[in-house]
Structure formats: C-alpha cells, structure tokens
Amino acid sequence: MERSRKCNLPTEKVFPIQIGSELFRLSGASIASDAPSYFSKFFEDQLLQTQDAANIRTLYIDRDPTTFREIARHLQGYHVRPQDGAQFVKLFADAQFYTLPRLMSQLFESECFIQIGDRHFQIPRDIFSSPGDTPNFFTLGFAAFFASPSEVFPGLDRQGLLRPPAIIPPSVPNRSADVFDELLHLLRGYPLHIRNEDHRAALLRDCRYFHLRGLEQKLIPYQITTNPFSQRSEIVIRLEDVRPSGIQSAQDVASGTVPAEGMVTYKRPFVDEDAADLVVEIGDESSVIHRESMRADFIGLTKKRIASLVQTVGKKMNLPDSHPPLGQIPIKIRVDRETDLTVDGDQDPQHLTMGSNIETGVQGAPPAKRLRSDSKADGPWVVRTGQWRLQVQVGPAGMHEVILVAVKLDVYTSAQVRNRSRTFL
C-alpha cells in the first residue's frame, strides 16, 4: 500500500536545508512531493512552535552535498538514476535516513549495482524470480539491498541523528566478471553455447558459489529421451549431479504400495515437471565389477554417493521399520543382453557368451553376460565409465533391494590394458 504523502507545509514557502557546506532552499511543494519525510516533519514541527514563518530554523545535516543535489532534483520532480555502485549506496542510505517513501520505492524497483571481479553490474531485482534461484548469495549477503523499504535500518532513531549508517558498495572481488556476465545472460532467459566442459565447469562453479540452484540444474550435463522399446522417458545424469530431492520412489502411484519390481525415477529439482527412469553415469574408473558374484565395489567419493543414493531411494519408498536399510556395499548388479559392453577397447568382444547360471534376483530377467572359463582375464573388471539403471526388486530373503542394471559399460580387464591408455606428459 502506498504511503500517504500528505504534507501541511505551505507550498510557496521556501525552507532552508544545510547539507555539509552547501545551503539548499526547497519549496514546500518540493518537500511535499515525497512526504511524510524527515524534512516535512522537521519543518512542520518548526511551524507549530513559532507563529512567525520568518523564524524557521535551518535544518543542518552533515552529509555529502553532491548526493543531496540528486535528492533535491528528485524532490523537484526529476527522475534520478544512480550511475554506479558508489552513487547507488549513497542515495540508498540517504533515502532511507530521510524516509523519502517515493525515492525508496524507486530505488527498490531499480537495478542493484554490484561489482563482480573488476566490472560493475546492474542487476534487475526480478532476475532471480525463477524457481530455485532465491534465496541466493545476493539476497542473503546483501540483504539490505534486496529487502523491502520498511525492513531497512529497523529501529533506527532518526531524531537528532546527523548521519545514517555507512554502507559499503556491494562487491564480490574474487569471482570472474566474464562468467557472471554469462550467468546473467542465462538468467534473462537467453540461450548460451557451452563451448567445452571447462566452460561448463566454470559456469557451474559460480552457480554454486552464488547459490543459483535452479540455474545450476539447467547447466548440468544430462539427456532426456523416450525409450522406444519401453515407451518410457529416461534421464541420463552423472552420479555427482543427482540431488536427493529429485529422487522419486518406486511406489505404485495408484495403490501407494511398493511393487515387487520397479525402476527408480528422477526429475531435476526446480526444472522438470515429470519424472523419468533414472540412468546414472559413473566415471573416473571408480567402479569395480566382481563377475563371479555379480556385485560391484566403488572407490572414493563414488562409494559415499552410491550409498547415499540408495539410502534415499529406501526413504522415498517408505519401507516399514522392520525392513533393513538399503544402501549396503557391495551392491548387486546385472549385465544382460541389452547392455552395450566394451571390454579392453573391443566393442564386440567375441570371448563373451551368455550364461544362464548367474543369479539376477529377478524372475524372467534376461540372462547375464559372462566370460568363458578360458578367458584371458580372471580378475575383476574396472569400469572406466558406466551407465546404470536403478531397479527395485525383492531379493531371495523377501526383502526389497536396489540393484544396478548395466546400460553401457567401458571396462578394463587388467592393469596392462589401463596402462596402454596412458599418455606421456
């Protein structure tokens, strides 16, 4: 609701205001143009205390007269627009201190001036309106500039106060101005060509720094397609980019029960409306397959991420308290006829055959791929990069478990093959 601008000062009367070393004379009409204010209340009190208008005291404030010239122009009916961050914070502080409601509203509706790196930016206040992009680094770190006019300087007693609190111009010197300029381009709704993975990593790094979670989800590498064989949507996403809030339970939506078998689905937070079958990509040679037991071990952060992912699936399924928790490592896997398998660089390995004696834990599932007994490699496989579906099934003990179904694997069978892929520095 717009504040009342009623002012009882005579419009033709000139009132003296001393700002620093410079004397300003403003008419009652100018002061009334943005009232009630510090000025209107001061001179109204003077008129109540004296019957002689000629004896009105000069209002003295020890502030910068250059800034007040802009405020005087505003009171005289001109549009005032800050030119940079330094001028913005001066006008911002003085407008709050003098309680000029119209100027405060104008500044809150205008851009916010912030220096990123070595460059000054004008950030529109509505640019963070997309889901997930607020609260963020700016609305939290520079709350005074993104609050409302009534929330700035709360409890400040302006009576007799010669100066408003000092405000430092907003600045983020340790981030790249070029990268931030591209983030603003994206936030305005324009597409941006991702030149390479280093470029994407720089954008994502600053997205996370500024807490732009919605924009981050649009920038992470992903692929959403419709599988023509299953007639279901699938989303391929890297394991490190999976967020717990995007995991959907494997419950049957109609009955609300946990089925004996079902695919774990996922939708990117703040971005996707519908969930799709989740296919996680795990790289960095952090997965090891034990072929005889058809289980997998994971190395480093991947181990923690897989355990957290499977535990999240268990929580989303709302399993009874009597059910043991999911997410125990090693985890069961399945490699079947649909798996695209590359072994030691061979995309059509002839030394593989299909064996039906591998326990899959799923009735009627396609038999798993298995090396012949005379294979040249008897040790575990190291997965250079793999894509896996997450599937919920009921194990032999009647308990629900999550298995990884191989979609696409690129594996090494020996350290020699891995060393062959090395390059000299």
Image (spheres, rainbow, N blue to C red):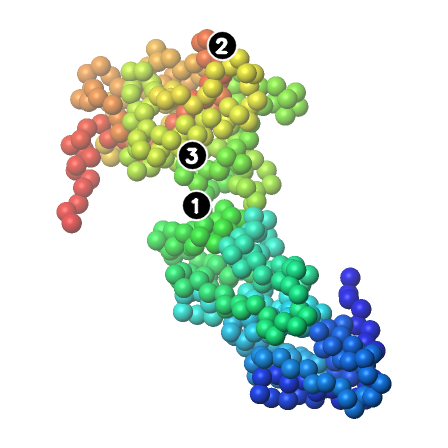
Q: In the figure, is residue 270 to the left or right of 25?
A: left
Q: Which residue is mark 1?
A: 221
Contact check, label 2 and label 3, Cβ < 8 Å? no
Q: Secondary structure at mark 3?
A: strand
Q: Amino acid at mark 1?
A: Pro
Give the residue displayed 49% in from the left and 10% down from the top. Answer: 398
Decide which of 353, 11 is in the foreground and name it.
11
Q: Gap in Å between the C-alphas at discs 3 and 1?
A: 12 Å
Residue type, numbered disc 3: Val
Q: Give residue 250's quadrant in the image.
A: top right
Kindly identify which numbered label has been placed on residue 398.
2
Mark 1–mark 2 distance (CA, rounded to whole Å): 37 Å
Residue in the foreground of this view, choosing between 332 and 169:
169
Residue 259 in sight from this viewpoint: no
Nearer to the camera, 405 or 24: 24
Q: CA distance from mark 2 to mark 3?
A: 26 Å
